[in-house]
Image: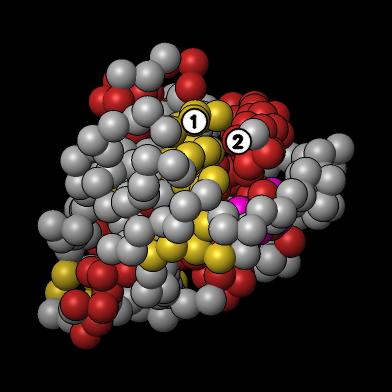
Amino acid sequence: MLRGSPRNAAILFLSTGVFSVSKSNSNYFKYDGGNFGDDLNDVLVPRLFGIEEYTPIGKEFPTGTHVVAIGSTLNTHIKMDDQSDIVVYGAGVGYQPAPRSLARFHFSCVRGPLTCEFLGLDKTLAAGDSAYALQDFFQAHAATKQEHKYAIVPHHLSLAEQRSKWNIDPDLGIVIDASAPLADVIRQISSCGLVVSECLHGAICADALGIPTCIVQTSYRFQSFKWGDWAASMQRQLQLNQLVWKGNHIDNACLANLKFEHTKPAHVSNIVSDLHARGEQAVEMFQHLRDR
């Protein structure tokens, strides 16, 4: 049913509550406003840590023990007092300067080796983007058959700012709005044989499902550091492709010339398994900090 991505049925990481904990005054951090990668936190963090509330960008965490997981969120947008602690599970650096101090940050793992280098962390903490821990979630919402050849997944702000230009020959594929509900985005991505993405977590969803991806840069919204961090963790070379437009439509000929690749299935499987193990470690960290 799925292309190149084995089911991890032995690890009921997200379908059970065996790791679930609860903590009053605990939040997770995400950018608000509706975006596929950020919104995946709404699935991962409650199921793993039992935390239901999030602190959006620009707001300060309440005093307590908190979680930073999926996204380029290890930056100065994180605001907390000196009595609070943060458990980091698979997040990365990007967009803003790094936090001024890491004294109250407790790392289970981060997105990739570039984040480790940037923050001065041990390289063994580079485990991969924690969205890969949602492989079973992606599989559960995947389409049962291929309906299109190409999926085009722009950065959600690229699409919002220039929606009129994001068109493709309907006989070839579809353009996916990464701000749509999670299940809709996953179903659309999985209904295509090839995924052209400017959205990092659109590419990660496809990669977790074994679908070849092509990374494109179409606007200043593209953030090369986070993409390089992801590629290094997945043992891939970051190869950027360009889309060509004819009027307000993506040129059919340019699609035929794009270069697609996918992470080796065995490596994806190893990443998923390692993230599950580090998820247990992150929960233990969280419980210890909460209860001390």
Residue 242 visible? yes
The span shown in magenta is 43-48
Tag 1 near tag 2, CB within 8 Å: yes
In three-dimensional space, the C-alpha distance between marks 1 and 2, rounded to whole angstroms, equals: 9 Å
Give the residue displayed 66% in from the left and 53% down from the top. Answer: 23
Q: Give the main secondary structure of the magenta stretch.
A: helix
Give the residue displayed 41% in from the left and 80% down from the top. Answer: 170
Query: On the image, numbered disc 1 is attached to which residue?
Result: 106
Query: On the image, numbered disc 2 is attached to which residue?
Result: 289
- Mark 2 lies on a secondary structure that is helix
Count residues near mark 1 (Cα–Cα under 10 Å), then give few for <14, some for 14-19, many for 20+.
some
Extreme residue toward the bottom, this view: 164
Q: Earlier in the sequence, mark 1 or mark 2?
A: 1
Residue 276 visible? no
The percent coordinates of residue 235 (x first, y second) are 44, 25
Give the residue displayed 32% in from the left and 51% down from the top. Answer: 79
Give the residue displayed 84% in from the left and 52% down from the top. Answer: 16
Q: Is residue 279 magenta?
A: no
Q: Is residue 241 left or right of residue 104?
A: left
In this picture, is 79 found above or below 124? below
Which of the image's four quarters has the N terminus? bottom right
Q: Nearer the viewer, mark 1 or mark 2?
A: 2
Foreground of the two, 83 or 54: 83
- Mark 1 lies on a secondary structure that is strand
In the rendered structure, which amino acid carries the disc numbered 1?
His
- Quarter assignment of residue 175: bottom left
In the rendered structure, which amino acid carries the disc numbered 2?
Leu
The percent coordinates of residue 141 (x first, y second) are 69, 66
Foreground of the two, 98 or 234: 98
Count residues near mark 2 (Cα–Cα under 10 Å), then give few for <14, some for 14-19, many for 20+.
some
